[in-house]
Every structure is written in structure tokens, then in C-alpha cells.
């Protein structure tokens, strides 16, 4: 959006080359000449006004105006493209987050089922109806289910951060990270009246 504003101002700047220009020059002189016999004072004032009206300058100004208007149109297209891209990223991130939540529910149920199955296999092995290999296989199924649950929880965290980034909220205050933030307005207030000097506020 700022790019569009800058392009529109550039169109106005280029159109300004077709406008008349006025220039005023004023000169004032006051001289004294003194000798033993006479004393002479001379005062001169001169004012000159000049107005220039461009008639034809080869067409370069008109070409730059047309170019600036085309650039402004391109910036408007870029804005719509950026909006569509952001909307697509938000929809994708939201879908990934919802899928990760559903995956967590599914893997949680899988972990619970695997735990029940492992307990059953252990009881059957205790009475001699299952072998040690069956118990190990049931334990492997439980480990796989827990691994899938951890992976789904990881995917949910990543998807939530992706969604925050897509909507422009992935920042330190939102994440609760308590570190000093750079405020450009504070820096501006510190250097706005510094007419001379090369040091910045932190001493460098």
C-alpha cells in the first residue's frame, strides 16, 4: 500500500515538470564614498521576476508521466497479488492446524488402544496363551503410537506458528518473550534535533 502511495506521488512529481516555474531575484546595494571634500551615498535596488513556461521538450516528460502511471498500476496489481497470497497462506495454515488437531485426537485414541492391547497381551502371556514375542510386538505398537502422538503435537505447534506468521502476529509480545523491543519512534525522538555529530544514541 505504501508502494502505491509512492507511485502516485511520483506521477504528480513527473506531472509537475509540465507546469510553469517562477523565479524572483532581488538585489540591494548601499554604498558610501567619503573623502576630504565630499561624501557620496549610493543606493541601488534591483528586482527581477522570471516565469518559464515549457512548450515542448522532446516528449521525455510525457513519457516519464506515462511510465509513472504504468508503475502505479503495477503496484496496485502487486497489492492484490500480495493479498491473495496472504489469504492463501492463512487458509493453508488454518487447514494444517485443524488437521494437526484431528491427528492428535486420532493418535491419542491409538495410544489408549495400544495400552489396553498391551495389558491384554501381558495378561494372556501370564497364563501362557501368548509368547514373549507377542508382548514385544504389542510394546512396539505402543511405542509407535506414542511416537505418532508426539509428531502430531509437534505438527500442531508448527502449524500454530505458521498461522500466526500468516496473519502477522508472530512477534515477541505475542509469544511472551520479554526482551527489549526496538521502537523507531524513540530513536527518531533522540536524533531529530541533532544537526551535527556522527554518534548514534547508543554511543557508536
Image (cartoon, rainbow, N blue to C red):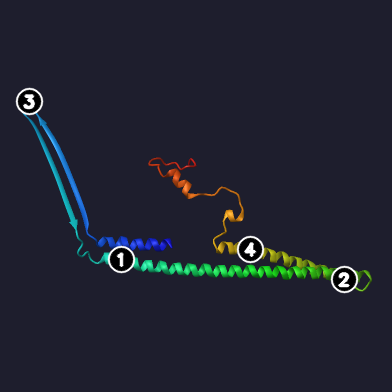
CA gap, disc 1 and disc 3? 67 Å
Q: Which residue is mark 3?
A: 36
Sequence-wise first label, 1 or 3: 3
| SS for dot 3 | loop
In the image, is 188 to the left or to the right of 166?
left
Viewer-nearest residue: 174 or 141: 174
Residue neighbourhood size for the residue with mark 1, other residues' Cα within 10 Å, grouped as few (<14), some (14–19), many (≥20) = many
CA gap, disc 4 and disc 1? 47 Å
| SS for dot 1 | helix
Extreme residue toward the right, this view: 127
Q: Which residue is mark 4?
A: 158
CA gap, disc 2 and disc 4? 36 Å
Any mark on residue 91, and which?
none
Q: Which residue is mark 1?
A: 65
Residue 41 vertical placement versus 151 (above, below): above
Sequence-wise first label, 2 or 4: 2
Amino acid at each position: 500500500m505504501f508502494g502505491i502511495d509512492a507511485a502516485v506521488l511520483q506521477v504528480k512529481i513527473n506531472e509537475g515538470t509540465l507546469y510553469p516555474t517562477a523565479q524572483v531575484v532581488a538585489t540591494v546595494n548601499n554604498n558610501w564614498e567619503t573623502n576630504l571634500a565630499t561624501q557620496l551615498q549610493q543606493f541601488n535596488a534591483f528586482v527581477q521576476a522570471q516565469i518559464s513556461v515549457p512548450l515542448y521538450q522532446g516528449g521525455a516528460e510525457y513519457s516519464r508521466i506515462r511510465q509513472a502511471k504504468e508503475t502505479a498500476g503495477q503496484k496496485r496489481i502487486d497489492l492484490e497479488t500480495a493479498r491473495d497470497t496472504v489469504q492463501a497462506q492463512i487458509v493453508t495454515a488454518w487447514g494444517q492446524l485443524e488437521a494437526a488437531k484431528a491427528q492428535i485426537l486420532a493418535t491419542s485414541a491409538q495410544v489408549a488402544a495400544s495400552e489396553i492391547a498391551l495389558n491384554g497381551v501381558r495378561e494372556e502371556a501370564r497364563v501362557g496363551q501368548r509368547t514373549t514375542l507377542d508382548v514385544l510386538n504389542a510394546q512396539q505398537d505402543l511405542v509407535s503410537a506414542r511416537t505418532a502422538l508426539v509428531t502430531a503435537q509437534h505438527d500442531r505447534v508448527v502449524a500454530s506458528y505458521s498461522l500466526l506468521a500468516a496473519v502477522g502476529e508472530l512477534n515477541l509480545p505475542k509469544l511472551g518473550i520479554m526482551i527489549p523491543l526496538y521502537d523507531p519512534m524513540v530513536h527518531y525522538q533522540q536524533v531529530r534535533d541533532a544537526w551535527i555529530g556522527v554518534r548514534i544514541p547508543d554511543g557508536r
